[in-house]
Structure formats: C-alpha cells, structure tokens
Amino acid sequence: MEIKTTINDTISYGEVIKPGSDLLIGKLTSRYNLENTAHSVALGLVYTDLLISGSANLSRDEFQSKLNELGSTIEVSLDKKGLLISINSLKSNLKPTLALFVMLMSQPSFTLKEFKRAKQSLKNVLELSKEDARELALAGLKNSFFNSASNQYTHPPESLIKAVDTVAHSDIKRFHNLILESSWIATAGGDSYAIKSFKDTIKKLKKQKVETVAYANNTFIGLKKCQAVLQEVKTKQNIEVSIGGYLPLTLKDDELPAFVFGLNVLAKWGGFSGRLMSTVREKEGLTYMIYGRTEGITATEAGCWRIATFFSPKDFIKGINSTINQIEKIARNGITESESERFKTILKTGETLVFDSLTNTTELVHIKLVSGISWEEHVSFREALYSCTRNQVNNALKDYLNTSSLTVSAAGPTSAVKQQLKQLLKVLN
C-alpha cells in the first residue's frame, strides 16, 4: 500500500492506495469550531442522527434500504475533534453509494418529525450512558485536568439531557452550513479509481468558506496533589478505574516518543506484555485487564496519560495501591535493557499488523491527519519511537510519570471504598 497526505486549511487529504482493491474506505472529518458547551455538544449529537435520517427525496427508511441493497454503510458520529462521516462501499457499488452521500449533504430533509424523534432518541441514549462506568471514569480523569471550555472536557449526561431541550429545529440547518464551511480532513483507502471518485465528490460538496475562530482552550487547570474523582453507579458490580496525570507534551515534542515507549513497557494497550498485566493481573489476580496510553494529544494540544482497569470493591484499594506502586517503580528506576530491546520488536510487530488491513490503515492515516500531522511526520515519530535509547525513555518517565499529582477516577459502587481511597491518597500527598 502507498500512503500520501496533503495538509491545507480548506481540505486536507489522505490516500491509502491499494491496487486491485474492490473496496472504498472513506473518512471525512469536519473540524468545526464551536465553544464546548453542553448545548453545542447536544446540537452536534442530534445532528448526527438527523443527517442520516433521509433527504429531500428519501425517507429515513428508504435511505437505509437503498444502502442495505448496495451492501454499503454511511455512518455519522461526533468526537472531540469534530464530526466524522465514514463510508464503506464495494467498488462495484461506489457510484450509487457516493450519490446517496451527496444527496445527504446537499439535500438534507431535517423534517420536524425526525427532529423530535432524534431528540427523544438521544435522551434515551444519554440516560443509558449514566450507567457506562468506564466512560464516566475516563471523563472524570480528563475533566480533572481541563476546564469546561476545553474541547477535552466531557459534559456529564445529566447536563446534556437538559441541553437537548434547548436545541431548536432552526439550529440544525445552521449547524449543517457550519459543517460544510469548516475545515475538512478527507481520507480514502482503495484503488486509484475509488480514491479519485471519493476526492472528486468531496471537492464538489465543500463550500469554500472556512471557520477560523478557535474556541478550544486546553489550558491545564492545575493539579498540585493527588486527588480522587468518584462517581456512584450502583448497578455495577465492579469499579471502573482511570488513573493518570496531565502530560504537557504534543506530537511535535521530541520527548513524546520516549515517554510513549516507556508507557508501553508499563501498560501496553492490549495483550499481556506490559508490566502491570504481569503484576496486577497475573501475579496478584486483582483484575482481568489493565492497559495504558496517552489521551487527547495532537500536534498543538497537550493531553494526559491514563491507566485503565477495573477492580471488585473488595480488591479496589489493594489494586489501586499495587498499580501506583508499579507506576512509581518505573518512574524511579526506569526500564531494563532487555525491556528496551523486547518492546522495540513488540511495537514494530503491532504496527505491521495494522498494515495488513486496508480499513485499519485508512483509519490510522485519518486519525493522524485529524491530529494535525502528515503521514511523513507520523513515520518520523515511529522511527523516533523505535530508536529511542533506554536513557531517553527513563528520563521521560522520570519527568512526566508523576505520582505526586495524579488523579484516581473511579465509577461504580464506589461508596464502599471512598474513605479508604482518601486515606491512601493522603499518604501519597
């Protein structure tokens, strides 16, 4: 596969060229700029439902029926980086699939009936999200570092449910125009014909105006000691946990590859190779999974590091203590020479597996473009990751894996462990 990327203010393009492929994997992100309020998030979520609820010529059921007949999918979602539209199609059905996509973008219906249905449906989803302990734990972690104006801040389900009622039908059309006028990132995977067809479609749809006012404010709010963020979810048996700290690095910083390498040694996401999996899970039997990675980092924005796991209430304090001990140990003593060599192989192998899939490769290229870096810059980052020395890794871990100002965010039946956790963190402080 050949990969090309082009970055500019109006439309940035990514191409994953696979000769002979019979698929199109298309990704389109609109980087609209709105202040991160509960209202703007609720508006975006209502819009994601409405956009695929039909056009001027087709009802929602008719539109979905045509997609099903083609064996194609068009999905719309919202994340911290903007609005994402994903298109999957067989090459043989590419023309009618893209025609349906154009119809959605150029002739959306946004009927009042569908608008009311979308708002009620969203409220139902948000009610269920009150029980999503893992996401609540992650939100609690990130919200402890960033204020509500930051695009990394997650508004609680209760606030979003109230905000849904403030979304007016007239807001939807204005939001749609904002999507068309904002900066776009478009990535396509397939053969040259499929990629050209996708790019030509994007060019025809894009309005030239680009929103330039940026509202995102990712300033660290300040954290000088360890803290606990607990959310009670009585319906859960286990307590979902996100442990982490603010990470003042971007994708452009030279120290980030070494830190990421060290974090993989501690808690590689997926598999059993990380230290925490071999200790907290295998040796101590306190959890089934415990993984780590960075969150929210882009070419211009800092983020945080995060350890994700879960414990039963009876093992919670022991598990938190064991996890923090391992974090402190690797921050203090660093990684071993054997770990340095072994993880270079592990990380290279993992990346090789990504390139076995057109879908995974296209998604990776798109994620990097949305994060503000070209494919060439990503390759340079990976080369730095594989070539960083043990001393570089250990210095990065010592500087940024700081257990004196971390957050323990937990969601589940937390009332039983609240006082014990406070006592544990008091010792750390």
Image (cartoon, helix red, strand yellow):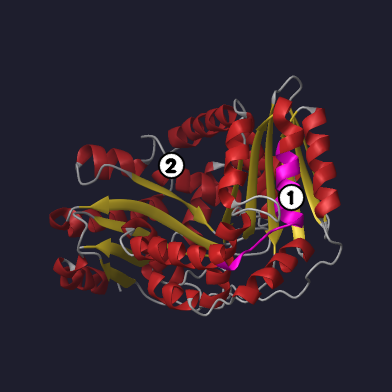
The kind of residue on which mark 2 rests is Lys
Where is residue 71? Give x, y as percent: 60, 31
Main SS, magenta residues:
helix
Q: Is residue 190 left or right of residue 263?
A: right
172 and 140: which is toward the camera = 172
Give me the residue at 42% from left, 73% from top.
161
Q: Provide the residue designation for mark 1.
A: 103
Q: Quadrant of the C terminus?
A: bottom left
As for residue 348 lying within the magenta part, the answer is no
Element under disc 2? loop
Q: Which mark is residue 268?
A: 2
Structural crowding at the residue carrying mark 2, measured as other residues with C-alpha within 10 Å and reported as few (<14), some (14–19) or many (≥20):
many
- Relative to 252, residue 376 above or below: above
- Relative to 123, residue 193 above or below: above
Give the mark nearer the N terminus: 2 vs 1.
Answer: 1
Which stretch did the figure color magenta? 97-112
In this rendering, does residue 407 appear at all? Answer: yes
In this rendering, does residue 373 appear at all? Answer: no
Q: Quadrant of residue 64?
A: top right
- Relative to 113, residue 290 above or below: above
